[in-house]
Amino acid sequence: MYAPSKSRTFMPLALIAAVAMTCLQGAAFAAEVPMQPVQKTVAIPVAGLNLASPEAQANVDAQIRRAARAVCGLDNYRDLRALAERPACEKAAIASATAKRDVLVARAQADQLAGRASRIAVTAD
């Protein structure tokens, strides 16, 4: 009868161990690299708008809200943490952009040219 030698049974086990170690090392290196947060920005053009008018202000406000939804959008809807943080992200992005809009509105209302600023940046961290 044929009896397998020790070297023949050892080879598959050694191969499996080598593959497992390679996979584990790859996972360990991947875990060590910290992911840098990606900052997304949407620019809203305001050059040429009469920001002293309530209609133009309402238009810019609507664009700011849409831009905030875009910059705080999810790349992965399975990421529950990002899904929970989305409303706070949108609120912060809107507040930041609205502050910039308010400066431009004040300039326009003071008869300064708001056309010097060409856009408002809506950014999410």
Image: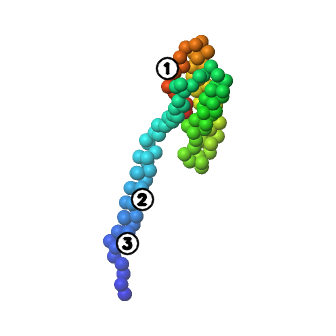
Task: Report the amino acid beneath label 3.
Answer: Thr
From the top left corner, tell me how far across and down residue 110 is, in percent.
59, 12
Residue 30 at x, y percent in the picture: 43, 47
Residue that badge 2 annotates: 20
| 28 sits to left or right of 103 | left
How much space separates mark 3 and mark 2, taking CA atoms? Answer: 17 Å
Q: Residues within 10 Å of mark 3 (few under 14, many from 20)?
A: few
Q: Which mark is residue 116?
A: 1
Q: Nearer the viewer, residue 38 or 50?
A: 50
Label 2 vs label 1: CA separation?
A: 61 Å
2 vs 1, front mark: 1
Circle 1: residue type: Arg
Is 16 left, or right, of 98 in this rendering? Answer: left
Q: Residues within 10 Å of mark 2 (few under 14, many from 20)?
A: few
Mark whose residue sits in front, 1 or 3: 1
x then y, percent, for residue 42: 52, 34
Label 1: state its secondary structure.
helix
Sequence-wise, the earlier of marks 3 and 2 is 3
Q: Residue at x 36, y 84 (%)?
A: 2
Residue at which label 3 appears: 9
